[in-house]
Amino acid sequence: MTDRLRRRTFLQALAMTSLSAVAHPPARGATPARLRLKNEDIDTALRAAVDRADIAGVVAMAATATSVFYQGNFGRRDISGKSEMSPDTTFRIASMVKLLTSVAALQLVETGKLTLDDPVAALDPTLSAAQVLAGFDAEGAPILHPAQKAMTLRNLLTHTSGLSYQLWDSNLVRYVKIARTKPDLPRMPLMFDPGTRWAYGGSLDRVGRLIELVSGKNLDQYFRDHILGPLGMANTGFSLTENQRARQASLHTRKADGTLIPQPLEKLSAPKTFSGGGGIYSTAPDYLTLLQALLNGGHLGTATILRPETVALMNQNQIGNLDAGILKTTNPALSNDVDFFPGVRLRWGLGHMMNLDPVEGGRKAGSLTWAGLYNTYYWMDPVSGIAGVIMMQVLPFADTRALRVYRRFEVGVYRSIARG
């Protein structure tokens, strides 16, 4: 049997088995034994990473559109404690909320409350009269000019708006230091004219605000009403219940010698504002549910969150020949330099990064991915029909050892599928 035929047979078998799973669904977060993929290679790799103290703990899962076929949890929530990782462990997933925000915005595009290509300043006046930072003069003063193009929702969803993050933009760091002493300067300029470049930044925070403006709901309520509730994602949100807090994994920082230092859990308070770009909590089973719905064309079970044609649009390159996905850190304590796939052409769809080339031993061309600051990651591979999520709690972002664990998990998943 060829590798391609073996993989197809395996996925078809999962799909057939899933019919029974849909009719008799397991408890939330559980994986029926008949759907599990027995994979000693993945288990061994994840367990070994914990044993070496490369990471404190990890939860990893993989699925087709309708069936979870791998679930593994290893290590502890706090490397100095006794609580073990479990499927329902709560994680801070930071920028992985951006996918939820993108889905929410596209729901409003479907209902006609938002459009992809009309100027967003008509809805949010704070986005009008945008100034672009062209550089600095001989005395070091910022050189600004009015934006030559109007910013659109498509620009915001694809990070071609001109907005950037200080963490990965040294020019913005320099500008902000000057602007603190000169109140006449714009607080946050654009780093380029909309649509002319790609830069990862606060675009999705602005999308979150647009969602609130046109829906009449705060972002937390909108997510619960239109995405989290319908999909049964009860462990995802901007605030935690006492039970979810008791299951939370601690953040660990990496010292220069490679050892991990656990940090106290952050102080909790009821949030009054909600970010479309960060600040949310989730679990691996919850987030995988969202990925399965998108892998399945926007619906899962009885819930529909997007139309199939909208999901197809999300999965298309939206930025042409602009390069995406490579970031140079300005703060090594928070993030390493980011280049997940050296030599692979990277672009952006309406929600996530996509690779135009296949990744050796792993995802196919056209796969979709992104991550959270504390080393949580996901990917969807529409060609292979699978999605994966892996959650750890480590700083800095793009931690070398955490990425190695992520890579071994992904390769193990594809090897298992090839073996059938």
Image (cartoon, grey):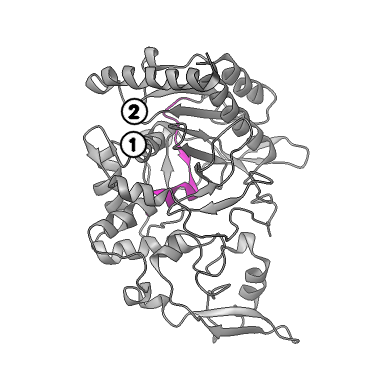
Where does the image place residue 352, in percent across and percent down from the top left?
48, 50
Q: Is residue 6 above or below residue 137?
A: above
Residue hosting label 1: 296
Q: Tell me, yes or no, whether the highlighted magenta stretch contains residue 97.
A: yes
Which three-letter amino acid code belongs to the residue tagged 2?
Answer: Thr
The kind of secondary structure element at disc 1 is loop
Q: Quadrant of residue 10?
A: top left
Q: Residues within 10 Å of mark 2 (few under 14, many from 20)?
A: many
- The residue sitting at 32% across, 53% down in the picture is 104
Where does the image place residue 107, in percent across and percent down from the top left?
28, 54
Which three-letter amino acid code belongs to the residue tagged 1?
Answer: Asn
Highlighted range, magenta: 86-101
**CA separation in Å, label 2 and label 1:** 8 Å
Is residue 240 shown to the viewer in this render?
yes
Q: Does 20 sit left or right of 140 as displayed?
A: left
Where does the image place residue 118, in percent across and percent down from the top left?
34, 72
The label number, if any, that marks residue 90 in the structure image? none
Q: Earlier in the sequence, mark 2 or mark 1?
A: 2
Front one among 223 and 385: 385
Front one among 265 and 22: 22
Residue hosting label 2: 66
Spot the residue most to the right. Answer: 257
Q: Tell me, yes or no, whether the highlighted magenta stretch contains residue 112.
A: no
